[in-house]
Amino acid sequence: MPTVVAEAFKNISKEVGLQIWTIEKMEVVPVPPQAYGNFFEGDCYLVLFVKKTSSGISQALHYWIGNASSQDEQGAAAMYVIQLDDYLGGSPTQYRETQGYESPEFKSYFKSGIVYKKGGVASGFKHIETNVYNIQRLLHVKGKKNITATEVDLSWNSFNKGDVFLLDMGKVIVQWNAPQSSRTERLKALLVAQDIRDRERGGRAQIGIMDGDQEAQHPELMKIMTAILGERKGELREATSDQKADQLQKSNIRLYHVSEATGSLMVQEVATRPLTQDLLNHQDCYILDQGGVTIFVWKGKEASKEEKQAAMNRGLGFIKAKNYPNSTTVVLLNDGAESAIFKQLFKKWTVKWQAQGLGKKYTVGKIAKVEQTKFDTTLLHARPELAAQCRMVDDASGKVEVWRIEQNELAPVDPKTYGQFYGGDCYLVLYTYMRNNKPAYILYMWQGLQASQDEIAASAYQAVNIDNQYNGEAVQVRVVMGKEPRHFQAIFKGKLIVFQGGTGRGGQTEEEPVRLFQVRGTMELNTKATEVPARATSLNSNDIFVLKTEQTTYLWCGKGCSGDEREMAKSVANNLSKREKQTVMEGQEPTDFWAVLGGKAPYASDKRFQEEECEYDPRLFECSNQTGRFIMTEIYDFTQEDLDEDDVMLLDTWEELFLWIGPSATDYEKQQSISSAREYLQSHPSGRDMDTPIIRVKQGSEPLTFTGWFNAWDPHKWTAGSGCSYDKMRGNLGDVSAMTQISVDLHNVDLNKKGAPASISHGFSQRSLSPQFKDSTLPVVSLPSVPTPDPSVPAGTSGKNCYPRQMLVNKTVDELPEGVIPDKKEQYLSDEDFVDIFSMSRQEFNELPNWRQTMLKKEHQLF
């Protein structure tokens, strides 16, 4: 086995992107980029992916094992992974991948899907087959987001009622859509077919599509399939469901300590969820078992070299000990270079230059200082990513309307009291602002902690009624008392006051003799006052508190507060009480102050620190409850294209959860979306805050706080005539199901197969068939012959006279000159008109693939 750095690694690129190698004769060989996404079942591969993250650069190193690869190849791949990891300084996260069970991260690199090919290097197959047409294979396409295409037996027995299949014959690819396949699955299969056409055939192949429940409407394509597969007998198999792990299974995590201190390897369970970072010791290795779905092996930076090199074997040994499938994904992580997916399994994760780890879960009155900074709101529309990070759709200058739920109905709130929320009530707040010169709406549902279940239910019901009044365009945000989002705070211009209990109904508010409010904020956009228990233990040195009594209102200023905070607190105090204000500095309190609070007592006085923004990469999931259990499929390296119109999608930015509702999602999914989000929070391995704001977003009405998390968001994607829908892509292919527009060369058909022709020609006269196939047992469709060109006429014309373009462009069959073949109008143009219309010569046009010629003719109304 090799011990020096492989020659292929010496020219390795450390730039962002993908690099792939395969094992040939125990040596590592780079795979050409044109072949990326194609994997031979008899081979092993190394895949390196480098990407930018919020904290810099991350590297992921995968080694992929084909089902038919040899033990020697697998061993060589494992050794080369160790070499490459050392060469890269031990920073990559390592993944062991097996065919058919790849991790979502691995699949995400291949947006057009993964194609499994039979054979391998040992079989004499080559890894790049550009412009090769001597091909005949059947591909089984599975998946909606991360798709795979597996080469299966060339037989009707390989088909089923739920998936999409591609019959690839070199010059023609026939896509067969099963009756139970979804539009998304058909779209993804079409992307695979187009990728094969463009990347492997240089664009010189045609794609025909037929629906399995409408085969009678595609007789020509059905004849082609019958020629290759034979007559179909009996019923197709039922669809096979994709095996997916549910969220509950993924939340069942256990941490094991791996040690050789006793002289033999010991693996001992040390903790279950929620895990904390301090459980990991730098001198040791650990195994984290995520419900048998993924096995993480963490290598401490001070562990021995032998221990680190044996880490993968330990993970594999753990799989055997637990009787997990051999296909279980194993991920190796280096201490200090943990992946975001690993970190989010822990309740809290920090690094030495950070003061705060993932997420923010506060306890009122007990939390350390959160630094409030000013920002320029004019930048929000120019930089949507800033809007997302700041959680602000605009500068909060829009129109505000507030209703309270009273007897399950909406009661308008007096504008003079806007911003005052009582824990015994539920409120609806409609915010209207302008976006792209059109009104946009955000509907906040504020739910008090002491409100009744009937009122909470009524608030949701009334929210739907208001949303319907605005054509379903309102973004709905569920707000739990005490967890108000930043934009919600901003729209009340520093007057947001949250009362611990009571009600504002009927204008009669419950007045306690003593009330204490914690005030936070440096300006109108981020100031909020929250009522806390009126006792000394509620104080915090980093904040300002307003103590309201029957005689006096005290403004208590902690040592850590700033001048801006004091000014905002004075404004809040004026809203709370018209009585005389007395400013009290921490450490200089009068006796009466402590007496009102029931006596002096210890309170939070830790030194102020700057809380940094959570270094949490947003995560996108496709949500489904169709199996009876909540199933989530994560989409890695997501883009706007991943938002599926048939689904409900969940975007987790940690501080907020967005539920994006596709227009074609099932009623059940729409109804269950909120409960699904709550289930996600409840089952999250790190123990998430159940009061995290949940925001419902509908397609076409996405706010900047949502779109800012996506790179290059296209606001016109879902408008009429835009986008890249399945129907539009299928239409762009033209009517290729017609025999006159398909040319199929089947010279490689097995002649011994009964009823199988060696050649079928469509779009040409029968004389073009090779003489040896004239007596084929399969009937050949007889088509009208195209007149033989006259040598005296310029190349490319039909042998008839040329006509002015006015007589050919945008003309029906009845309007054409006599003798002009309707689908060959371009052949009757003069050379001058031809070049003027198509901006190319006839020869250049004829060298284009047929599908491209058809598109150009349609574009210029010559089809």
Image (cartoon, rainbow, N blue to C red):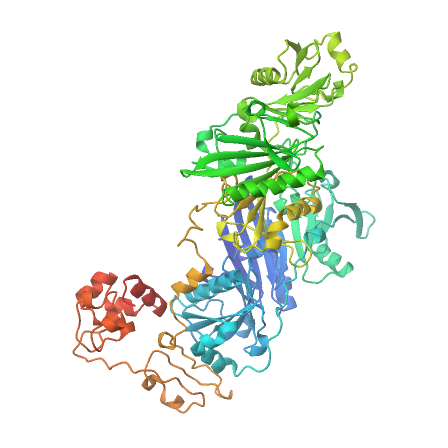
Classify residue 528 by image quadrant.
Answer: top right
Q: Position of residue 671 (x, y in %)?
A: 62, 50
Looking at the picture, does residue 742 appear above or below residue 539? below
In the image, 77 versus 120, the foreground residue is: 120
Q: Quadrant of the N terminus?
A: bottom right
Q: How many marks?
A: 0
Residue 297 shows in this picture = yes
Q: Residue at x 19, y 77 (%)?
A: 800
Q: Where does the image place residue 839, in percent across and percent down from the top left?
A: 24, 60
Determine whether 500 is above or below 170 in the image: above
Relative to 130, is 593 on the left or the right?
A: right
Left/right placement of residue 542 relative to residue 813 reads right
Displayed quadrant of residue 157 = bottom right
Q: Is residue 193 above or below residue 305?
A: below
Question: Camera-side residue: 144 or 57?
Answer: 144
Q: Can residue 212 be seen by looking at this rendering? A: no
When the figure is inspected, residue 567 is found, relative to residue 360, above or below; the finding is: above
Whole-percent x and y of residue 781?
Answer: 39, 84
Residue furthest out toward the right: 262
Q: Residue drawn at (21%, 65%), measured in percent from left and top?
A: 834
User: What is the quadrant of the C terminus in the image?
Assistant: bottom left
Q: Which residue occupies the foreground of this view, 228 or 309? A: 228
Image-based side of 262 in relation to 392, left or right: right
The quadrant holding residue 402 is top right
Q: Please provide percent x and percent y for residue 254.
A: 75, 49
